[in-house]
Image (tube, rainbow, N blue to C red):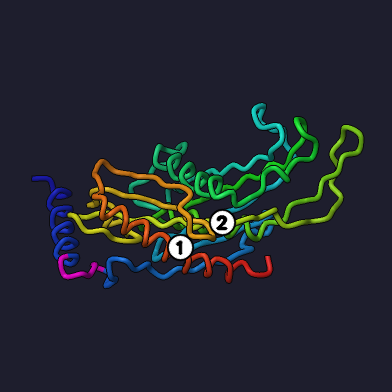
Amino acid sequence: MPKSFVVETIKRNQIVDALAKGKRLDGRGVNEYRKLEIKTHVIQKANGSAMVTLGDTQVLAGVKIDKGVPFPDTPDKGLLIVGAEVLPMAASYLEAGPPDESAIELARVVDRGVRESEMIDVSSLVIKEGKWVYSVFVDVNILNVDGNLFDATSYAVVAALLTAKMPRFVLDGDTVKDTGERLPLPVRKVPVSVTMATINGTLVLDPTEEEEAVMDARITLDTEDEGHICAGQKGEPGSFTPEQVLTAAEWSIAKGREIRQKIKEATAGG
C-alpha cells in the first residue's frame, strides 16, 4: 500500500474525528477564519499594492495602470484584468512553468468577484470612447500555500485596488498625455470572497491545505456592501445539500461584513 495513501487516510480520519466534536485540527470552530493580516503600499513602483496573510497562506498583489485600447465590444469601458501566478517556492509540489489550470481558475474567480460586484466604475475609465481607455492590471503572486487561495487572493486584489492611484490622462489632439496628477480609482463597492468546503458532510469555513486535500466539495461566494451575493464558484466533484447552500450564504454575508470592515481599516487613507 503506497505510503501517501496511508498518510492521507490517517489525516482524513483525524480531521473527520475532530469535526465530529465540532472542532478542527488547528482548534478553530467550523465557521471561524484563521488570523487575517493586510498590509498595503508594499510595492514601491506599483500604482497600488497589498500583501495578505491568511493563516500561513500569503499573497502579494500589485496594480499597474496605463492607457490602453478598449475591447471592440465595449468601446465605452476601461479595462480591468486580474492575473495570478503561484510561485514554485510557494509549495513543495509546484514546478516552474506557465500558470496551470488551478492558477487560471484562481484568477478568473477573483476577477469575477471584483467585476460582478461592480467594484470599479469602468465606464468612467474612458479617455476617448472607442480609442483610448485606462487599463487596470492586477498581478498576483502566491508566496506561500496553506489553503484557501481564493479568499486570500481576493482580499489582496481588493486592498490593492482600494489604495491604487491612477495617472490623470488628457487628450492633446490624438495624443494622450500624463498631467502628473494622481487620482484614486473610481471605487463603488468593496466585494468580499468567502470560501467554504464540505468534509464528510460537515461545512467548514476557510479550509486549510490539509482540509482541502480531503474535502468533498468547495464553494466560494462573493458579497458586496449591501450583503447581496454577486458571484459564486463551486469546485471539486462533490455536492452541497440545500441546507448547506443556505448556511454557506448566511456565512458569506456575516463573515463578509466582518472582513470588509478589516479591509476598509487596512486601506483607510488610500
Quarter of the image where the N terminus is located:
top left
Q: Mark 1 is on which residue type? A: Gly
Furthest toward the top, the residue is 72
Question: Residue tagged by mark 1?
Answer: 256
Residue 10: quarter of image: bottom left
Residue 21: quarter of image: bottom left
Would you call the spot at circle 2 few (<14 residues within 10 Å), some (14-19), or many (20 or more)?
A: many
Residue at 64% in and 28% down: 73
Q: Which residues are magenta?
A: 20-25
Residue 41: quarter of image: bottom right
206 or 144, which lies in front?
A: 206
Residue at 21% in and 59% down: 202
Q: Mark 2 is on which residue type? A: Val
Quarter of the image where the C terminus is located:
bottom right
Furthest toward the left, the residue is 1
Q: Main secondary structure of the magenta part?
A: loop
18 or 96, which lies in front?
A: 18
- The x and y percentages for residue 121 are 66, 48
Q: Taking 98 as reference, is 248 above or below it?
A: below
141 or 31, which lies in front?
A: 31
**Element type at marker 1?**
helix
Would you call the spot at circle 1 few (<14 residues within 10 Å), some (14-19), or many (20 or more)?
A: many
Question: Residue tagged by mark 2?
Answer: 158
Label 1 and label 2: CA atoms lie apart by 13 Å
